[in-house]
Amino acid sequence: MYRQTASRKRIFFLFLLFLSLWLIFASFTPKKQYRGNKEPVPEAKNIILMVGDGMGLAHVTAARIFKNGPDGESLYLETLPTIGYQRTHSASDSLTDSAAAASAWANGEKFNNGEISCHDDDQDGRCEPAPSPTILEIAKAKGKVTGLVVTSTVTHATPAAFGSHVPSRRCEKEIARQYIQVTEVDVILGGGRKKFKSTEKQADECGTFGDFIADAKRKGYQVVYTKKALDGVVAKGSRKILGLFTPKGKTPELFRLYPEEHYQAEEPTLPHMTAAALEIVERAEDGFFLLVEGSQIDWASHRNDVAYQIGETLAFDEAVKVVLNWINEKPNRRHNTLVIISADHETGGFAISSARGRKYKRGDIV
């Protein structure tokens, strides 16, 4: 997402803003009333933010038609009680990128495109003024467990904005360093193994390189590279896990849609990683903050690859199902957990059209 395509410059909007189960944010007071609720709405102990990167209204519609047909059931992300949309922009551009969008979420203020929770207006490579703590860092300071679960590299723009402060989204090795050495995010699951171990010749735009996997092990992280290993450390009750399942981004979910394609058995899917993360973070007595991102909806849309895009959107929706099922299993989870599902922007200017008189069927690539 380092370059905005011409099609991306056509449409931008924030989609599915604040689809919450309890319709409040953690900073609201326990006595806050919402739309005539008769009982006080409690303050959220746990926050789960789910991001469909680049996911617009047409993306959701196409995925629903493919899965259920035009007259079929809604996707899971369409079933929550409050749905809306909002126009958005970054500090520097009419159209935001993922870095500025996620930084705005994480910090409550606007940033320039490309910046990761860091103001670098004079482009000298320094954060000035000194950055404020992100919501993840605030949660950490309050004793909450924190987690980042993505299908991109774990150092990509959206997760990075919550766990680091760098002048450029291209500083992925510096982001990796900060995750481990500074922020100490408890659970990190996704792709991007190459960003955590590099030589001086492989330094990023910030000049950072090093063996951050070794650093993670010294700090007590269980480092895993396969689904089996992840399941093993979760079963043992590990509290700090670094799961890097691919050298770069994770394998596209498209490969699971067709029998002739092989999705690596040792690589966990987004729903599986989400379930594993929930099992870890729910052990926290003081609650947790968890980010889950369907990162490659955006990547597919940059390529105008509808099959790839639908696969990623449906995988994200399955992760939503995992979260909703987890919440509904126990009353205290429903009482204490806020879920927010949103896109950061739309990518590709995606639209659905058909010949006159044609009605798409389940399984059609629209």
Image: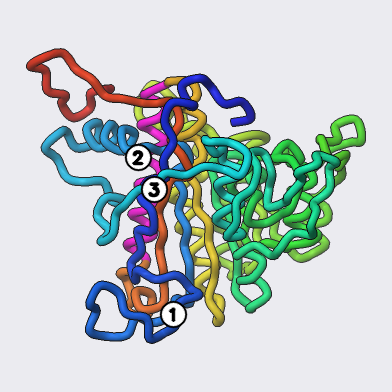
Going by the numbered disc 1, the residue's amino acid type is Glu
Tell me the magenta residue range.
Answer: 305-326
Front position in the image: 101 or 91: 91
Q: Are marks 1 and 2 in contact (CB under 8 Å)?
A: no
> Distance of mark 3 from mark 2, alpha carbons?
23 Å
Whether residue 35 sits left or right of residue 153 in the image: it is left
| Residue 289 shows in the view | yes
Q: Is residue 205 above or below residue 147?
A: above
Q: Are marks 3 and 1 in contact (CB under 8 Å)?
A: no
* Quadrant showing the C terminus: top left
Q: Is residue 41 above or below residue 306?
A: below
What residue did someone put label 1 on?
43
Front position in the image: 102 or 315: 102
Q: Is residue 62 above or below residue 172?
A: above
> Distance of mark 3 from mark 1, alpha carbons?
25 Å
The residue drawn where x is 64% and y is 62% is 134
Task: Indicate whether residue 310 is drawn in magenta.
Answer: yes
Residue 308 is tagged as none
Task: Indicate whether residue 126 is drawn in magenta.
Answer: no
Whole-percent x and y of residue 7?
46, 21
The residue drawn where x is 34% and y is 74% is 334
Residue 86 is tagged as 3
What residue did someone put label 2 on?
314
Whether residue 217 sits left or right of residue 268 in the image: it is right
Front position in the image: 36 or 240: 36
> Distance of mark 1 from mark 2, alpha carbons?
31 Å
Numbered disc 2: secondary structure: helix
Going by the numbered disc 3, the residue's amino acid type is Gln
